[in-house]
Image (tube, helix red, strand yellow):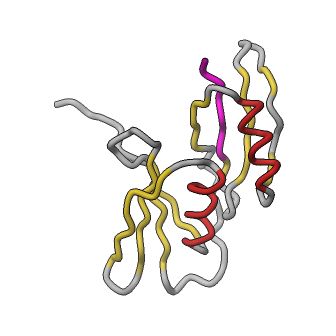
Amino acid sequence: MAVRYLHTCYRVLDLDRSIDFYTNKLGLELVRKVPIGEEATNAFIGVPGDPEPRLELTLNHDRETPYELGEGYSHVAFAVEDLDALAERLERAGGVEFESRPHAISTGTRLFFVRDPDGYRIEFVERR
């Protein structure tokens, strides 16, 4: 039996704000929004050209306060070709919280982190 990665899911407080962040600021695509009865709505976000959405955002309709991120969660990572250009674009877009700026780690890999509107960490790794 083969196992393949489908997606990561987490809960958000404001679905429209999160969709705006992932699509308009990061350049990902909204694949579909699906109501889950009357209690929740799921939004599936994908990488352009990838047939499978890789991020599922869940809005629980009765939630009024932010979720605690938890101690085990670390981040979602995306590969990009030009780290500096992306950082500049996000800076110009405004409303993006940078946790770090583009930098190299000991292995020579270049990366940086931002936080989405709910505080989830997102890593961008330069892959040329």
Q: Residue furthest top?
A: 107
- The residue drawn where x is 41% and y is 78% is 40
Q: Which residues are magenta?
A: 122-128
The front one of 59 and 82 is 82
Q: Compared with residue 100, is residue 108 higher up or lower down, i.e. above or below?
A: above
Looking at the picture, does residue 102 appear above or below residue 22?
above
Query: Could you tell me what secondary structure mostly forms the magenta stretch?
Result: strand
Q: Is residue 126 in the magenta section?
A: yes
Q: Does the stretch in magenta take in 88?
A: no
Q: Give the percent coordinates (x, y) of residue 106.
A: 77, 15
Q: How many marks?
A: 0
Extreme-left residue of the structure: 1
Residue 13 pos. (x, y %): 60, 73
Q: Residue at x 61, y 44 (%)?
A: 75
Q: In the rendered view, does 70 fall on the left or right side of 3?
A: right
Q: Nearer the viewer, residue 21 or 76?
A: 21
Image location of residue 56, percent across then percent down: 44, 57
Where 112 sits versus 20, above or below?
above
> Residue 101 or 65: which is nearer the viewer?
101
Q: Quadrant of the N terminus?
A: top left
Residue at image location 71% in from the left, 38% down from the top: 86
Q: Quadrant of the C terminus?
A: top right
Q: From the top left corner, tell me how far across and down residue 26 is, in percent.
A: 62, 48
The answer to whether 67 is drawn above or below residue 124 in the figure is: below
